[in-house]
């Protein structure tokens, strides 16, 4: 399938078709040294014993006493075969559920059995990021890294801190001052990371961490890291598995730095090329209106993948304008509070592969959707709820049909951002607020209050 000069099963390749430089899988690069573009992990599939049917991966449920078969990432290891088993890292990530949710479906006016919520809050650090870190830390071990770093809106730092201490790596995380939910900040500190709060937003942290990593040769764990995105492909494999290996009509995901959306499109493209699925689902990526670069660029500026020849001038003009206006993104969904998403071009590729759509939803829509997911589902953090808020738009517009099968990725756990949840309910901030009732310390009075 690939005409690579690399004879290894896996190698890295620049996504810029005019460059297309290739690099060994054993290098820690994160950007193409020749042209500065993003790198992909690519495979020589003929050198890999990929199962003939996706269903065959299910056999590993019988051997879950082996840590690699237990891992929700590594039990799909032939589909991300860049690292020998002895370097593979796992702390039990990916034990997630795909929950069919009739109540939320009915709330949205969908056919009741058509909505599924892929709950990634069940991961060890409480977000989907652990899928990516299992893969990225395996690569870090493979290349002999000793220290690592990341910029984070919160969950990346929690996940990096957890994996770093379990791998014995030193770790520094960069967060925007005041831009991180309390649950996440508490994890970074608790898991022993050096936490640096930069006076700035995520985009400032992202710029600084790249310079710090190249100056000090730290291993970078942001989603620029192509190996991390390989781990995030497995979220899609688990959705297929949860549907009895059938392909849904739609995948809905929040869009922040656009790592997930990039990984999901790559996952489906590869499965299709390998003949393991017959069709590719459509992808809906949901921004918050206060951080809607992707929505603006795709829907208004008509930015497209164009076989990799992306119109860079549109992006440069857009970012120059953000800088000129001193723009800083603002949304209560702090995990997607990003104005310069590093995986923009890979995400455009996914939109192309999956016939994708992009929408933006307001904070009000996000917090109301979050309350519905809490009331009828397993709960989630604000960014995750953008999926249901976005799905509502797409149903109203008739882009998603009421009887289409939809899987929404709930990216993070509800306890990540307790302040927002308490504020919403206690201070009656939204339509679905469920405030506590004050009661005197008196049995008869208390009994009168029970409804
Ligand atoms: C990181 C994160 C996102 C954003 O995902 P991207 O892959 O960066 O687009 C969304 N939700 C949660 C909970 C996150 O932690
Ligand atoms: Zn290049």
Image (cartoon, rainbow, N blue to C red):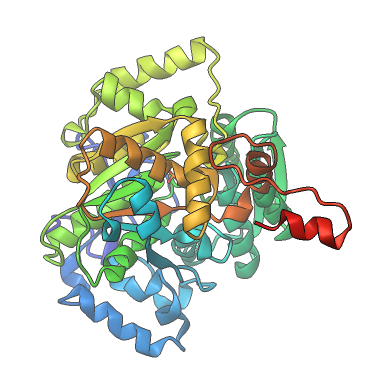
Left or right side of 192 for 292: left
Which sits in the foreground, 393 or 176?
A: 393
Residue pictured at 83% horizontal, 60% vertical: 444
Residue pictured at 65% horizontal, 54% vertical: 171
User: Where does residue 422 sit, x and y in percent of width and height?
Assistant: 68, 45
Which sits in the foreground, 349 or 399?
A: 399
Quadrant of residue 85 in the image?
bottom left
Q: Is residue 128 above or below residue 387?
A: below
Quadrant of residue 257 in the image?
top left
User: Where does residue 84 sit, x and y in percent of width and height?
Assistant: 39, 74
Left or right side of 230 for 268: left
User: Where does residue 63 sit, x and y in percent of width and height?
Assistant: 39, 89
User: Where does residue 88 sit, x and y in percent of width and height?
Assistant: 46, 72
Quadrant including the C terminus: bottom right
Q: How many marks?
A: 0
Left or right side of 438 for 119: left
Which sits in the foreground, 126 or 111?
A: 111
């Amino acid at each position: 399938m690939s005409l690579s000069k690399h004879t290894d099963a896996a190698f890295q390749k620049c996504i810029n078709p005019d460059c297309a430089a290739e690099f060994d899988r054993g290098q820690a690069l994160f950007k193409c040294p020749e042209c500065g573009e993003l790198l992909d992990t690519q495979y020589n599939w003929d050198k890999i014993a990929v199962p003939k049917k996706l269903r065959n991966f299910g056999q590993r449920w019988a051997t879950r006493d082996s840590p690699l078969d237990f891992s929700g990432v590594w039990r799909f290891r032939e589909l991300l075969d860049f690292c020998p088993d002895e370097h593979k890292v796992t702390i039990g990530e990916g034990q997630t559920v795909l929950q069919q949710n009739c109540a939320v479906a009915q709330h949205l006016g969908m056919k009741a059995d058509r909505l599924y919520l892929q709950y990634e809050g069940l991961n060890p650090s409480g977000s989907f990021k652990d899928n990516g870190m299992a893969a990225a830390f395996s690569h870090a071990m493979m290349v002999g890294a000793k220290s690592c770093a990341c910029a984070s809106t919160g969950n990346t730092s929690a996940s990096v801190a957890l994996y770093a201490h379990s791998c014995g790596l030193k770790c520094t995380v960069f967060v925007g001052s005041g831009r991180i939910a309390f649950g996440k900040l508490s994890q970074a500190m608790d898991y022993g990371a050096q936490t640096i709060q930069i006076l700035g937003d995520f985009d400032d942290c992202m710029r600084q961490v790249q310079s710090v990593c190249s100056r000090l040769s730290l291993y970078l764990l942001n989603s620029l890291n192509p190996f991390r995105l390989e781990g995030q492909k497995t979220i899609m494999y688990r959705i297929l598995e949860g549907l009895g290996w059938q392909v849904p009509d739609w995948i809905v995901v929040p869009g922040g730095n656009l790592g997930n959306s990039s990984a999901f499109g790559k996952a489906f493209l590869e499965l299709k090329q390998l003949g393991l699925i017959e069709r590719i689902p459509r992808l809906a990526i949901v921004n918050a209106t206060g951080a809607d670069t992707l929505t603006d660029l795709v829907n208004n500026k008509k930015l497209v993948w164009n076989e990799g020849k992306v119109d860079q001038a549109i992006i440069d003009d857009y970012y120059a304008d953000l800088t000129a206006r001193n723009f800083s993104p603002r949304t209560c969904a702090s995990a997607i509070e990003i104005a310069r998403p590093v995986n923009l071009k890979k995400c455009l590729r996914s939109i192309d592969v999956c016939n994708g759509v992009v929408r933006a939803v307001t904070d009000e829509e996000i917090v109301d959707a979050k309350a519905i997911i809490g009331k009828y589902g397993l709960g989630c953090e604000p960014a995750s709820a953008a999926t249901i808020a976005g799905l509502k738009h797409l149903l109203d517009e008739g882009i998603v049909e009421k009887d289409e099968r939809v899987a929404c990725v709930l990216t993070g756990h509800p306890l990540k951002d307790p302040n927002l949840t308490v504020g919403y309910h206690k201070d009656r901030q939204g339509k679905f607020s469920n405030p506590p009732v004050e009661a005197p310390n008196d049995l008869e009075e208390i009994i009168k209050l029970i409804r």
